Image: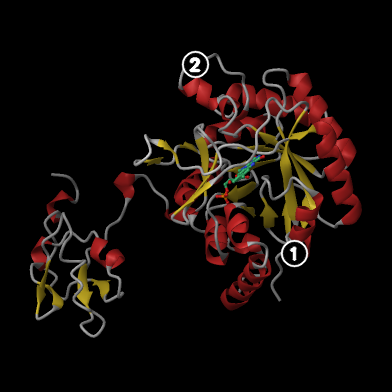
Amino acid sequence: MPTLKVNFAGLELKNPLIVASSELTDEFDKIKWAEDAGVSAVSTKLAFLKVPFFARPYHIFEEGMGFYSPSGHRLNVEEAQELIRKTKEQTNLVVIANMMGPGEDLEGWARLARMLEEAGADMVELNMSCPNVGLMAKQLNITAPPELGAVLGQNPALAREVCRAVSQSVQIPVMAKMTPEAQTAVVAAACAEGGARAVSAINCPMSLPGVDINNDGKPLYPTTRNQSFAGLCGPWIRPLAFRHVAQIAMRSPDLPIAGGGGIMNWEQTIEMIMYGAKVVTYCTLLFKRGYKIIPRIAKKILHFMEEKGYETVDDFRGCGLKYIVTPEKVEYVYMIPQIDENLCNGCGTCVNLGHCEVMALQDEKAKVVAPTKCYSCAVCYWLCPKKAITMVEPSDPSLKGPYHFWKGGV
Ligand SMILES: Cc1cc2nc3c(=O)[nH]c(=O)nc-3n(C[C@H](O)[C@H](O)[C@H](O)COP(=O)(O)O)c2cc1C
């Protein structure tokens, strides 16, 4: 019988499903919903020694794919301590305390971490990744920004020292949260050198939603009069998250990773693990769908493991990494499209591609009319709304496509 249990940087978790730090984890009642749904751990909302400015959460959910989060309800350390104490007293959850110290003041980082440890946190998560603190000022060159959030996360040397200062001050494991605005593999390795026992990746990249074109370019947020740049999360960042997690795993194979960013279902959870994550974090998914999805994800992963013969999550963790090579080492298989006429509805999607003249519509069906011009990109295969196209090796072996002479270099 497979098990979902994992050991994450010394923490025994009943499964790899974790709620990411956010307004999902800023109040006890919400954390209780998470426990009832069956997650193993929560990362509590970002705590400061003193919250730097008032910020209320406001969001845009664009096409169900991009969730813009420019701000949030952060916790002063006393509030965070109270939340952690209550969670430890009244639930069986593993509590990860997300926190941000005062920039270059290493003792401040250490003090905050100690206070959260004293309250009962099982791990601290050093937030060197929030795009809404400092990074905007840095990118616009407005002020010399404090070394906070994603600004710190772009500075591997300081990130290493922050991890060192905190690791030397607490007994519990330290995790550092990465910003995709940096070379995360380098920063993660530096954090591990400083004593971090794990990293989480990724926090939101900085972004900007569109504007109201009929209203003087005003922001689309219905509840604000202006806007700042915004952290972007949800499905649009998933490929970025895969990239960063894979790069960290390839550079630091022994460093446990909490992988997250746009993970919306059980299949994507498995993909994240196959790219090297030990545990998986959810945020936008839960904002959008609520907690009823969590038991389903757990059940589906167990079923998948049973079917594939995996005993533990570690059996398939990182298995996707061996296929990642540098571009000059990619091995190509020459394939051309084959159309199932029974499925094709003649919509013409594959005929109207800007880069390709392989297909034409004949008798209201797509036909392969110029196979010698096919360079095997498979765009038609991905775009066909009826799944009528498969890519097959050509029966005529002399058919090699227009770019075959590139092989070996010309
Ligand atoms: C409303 C909101 C608040 C967030 N607050 C925090 C936070 O306090 N600390 C933190 O490290 N990340 C925070 N994040 C980032 C998430 O933890 C997560 O890393 C990010 O949203 C990507 O995951 P997702 O695509 O599953 O949402 C927040 C995200 C959202 C949407």
Q: Where is residue 136 in the image (x, y as percent from the top left)?
A: 51, 26
The front one of 331 and 280 is 280
**In the drawing, does residue 94 fall left or right of residue 349?**
right
The residue under the point 57% across, 74% down is 308
The residue under the point 64% across, 43% down is 255
Q: Position of residue 97 (x, y in %)?
A: 76, 41
Q: Mark 1 points at which residue?
A: 38
Q: Is mark 2 on a helix, strand or loop?
A: loop
**Disc 2 packing (10 Å; few <14; some 14–19; many ≥20):** few
The residue under the point 68% across, 63% down is 291
Observer able to see residue 188: yes
The residue under the point 53% across, 14% down is 143
The front one of 217 and 61 is 217
CA gap between label 1 and label 2 equals: 45 Å
Q: Quadrant of ligand 1?
A: top right
Q: Nearer the viewer, mark 1 or mark 2?
A: 2
| Residue type for callout 1 | Gly
Q: Is mark 1 on a helix, strand or loop?
A: loop
Q: Where is residue 77 in the image (x, y as percent from the top left)?
A: 81, 32
284, above or below 196, in the image = below
The front one of 151 and 332 is 151
**In the drawing, does residue 181 fall left or right of residue 297?**
left
Q: Residue 194 carries which label?
A: none
Quarter-of-image position of residue 160: top right
Whether the residue carrying mark 1 lies under 8 Å from ligand 1 is answered with no
Check the picture and name the quadrant holding the N terminus.
bottom right
Whether the residue carrying mark 2 lies under 8 Å from ligand 1 is answered with no
Q: Mark 2 points at which residue?
A: 142
**Disc 1 packing (10 Å; few <14; some 14–19; many ≥20):** some
Which residue is most to the right?
Answer: 89
93, above or below 56, in the image = below
Observer able to see residue 171: no
